[in-house]
Amino acid sequence: MNNNKQIVKLQLDYLQGPIWISDIETGEPFTGIEIIDTDARVWELNKKIGQRFSSYYEFDSHDQPCWFNEAQRNADRELMLGWLQQLKNRLDEINDGSFVVEDLETPAWEKI
């Protein structure tokens, strides 16, 4: 078990980075883990990854209300894997033992 350690999930969704933010409008980071919430490098990477992932969604495109650009996602595979690794490395660097990272994204990107 995690013995009271908080879990930080890395999981992408539209308008979210791998670490979900509390407020999409302000972009304020909030995991409840101060060491993460105050780390500029974590949030820089998180924002960059989230913006790239969200760019794959195209609205009113290809005769569909919302179309997902799989070709661009596939082309970005190595880039996204690199950024995810950088994010995980940074989380490892700042981890004071109060959290564990559950990476749900890297395995998905590796399968592309």
Image (cartoon, rainbow, N blue to C red):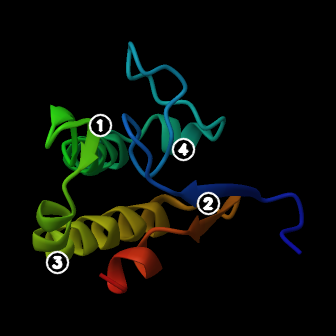
On-image quarter of the C terminus: bottom left
The secondary element bearing badge 3 is classed as helix
Q: Earlier in the sequence, mark 3 or mark 4?
A: 4
- Residue located at (47% from left, 30% from top): 29
Q: Nearer the viewer, mark 3 or mark 1?
A: 1
Label 1 sits on residue? 66
x%, y% of residue 110? 34, 84
For the residues marked 1 and 2, what is the alpha-carbon distance in whole angstroms?
41 Å
- Compare residues 15 and 6 and report the one nearer the observer: 15
Q: Earlier in the sequence, mark 2 or mark 3?
A: 3
- Residue located at (45% from left, 68% from top): 105
Q: Is residue 107 above or below residue 80?
A: below
- Compare residues 94 and 105 and report the one nearer the observer: 105
- Compare residues 22 and 53 and report the one nearer the observer: 53
Label 3 sits on residue? 78
Find residue 35 and name its label: 4
For the residues marked 2 and 3, what is the alpha-carbon distance in whole angstroms?
29 Å
Question: Which residue appears farthest toward the bottom when viewing the image?
Answer: 111
Q: Earlier in the sequence, mark 4 or mark 2?
A: 4
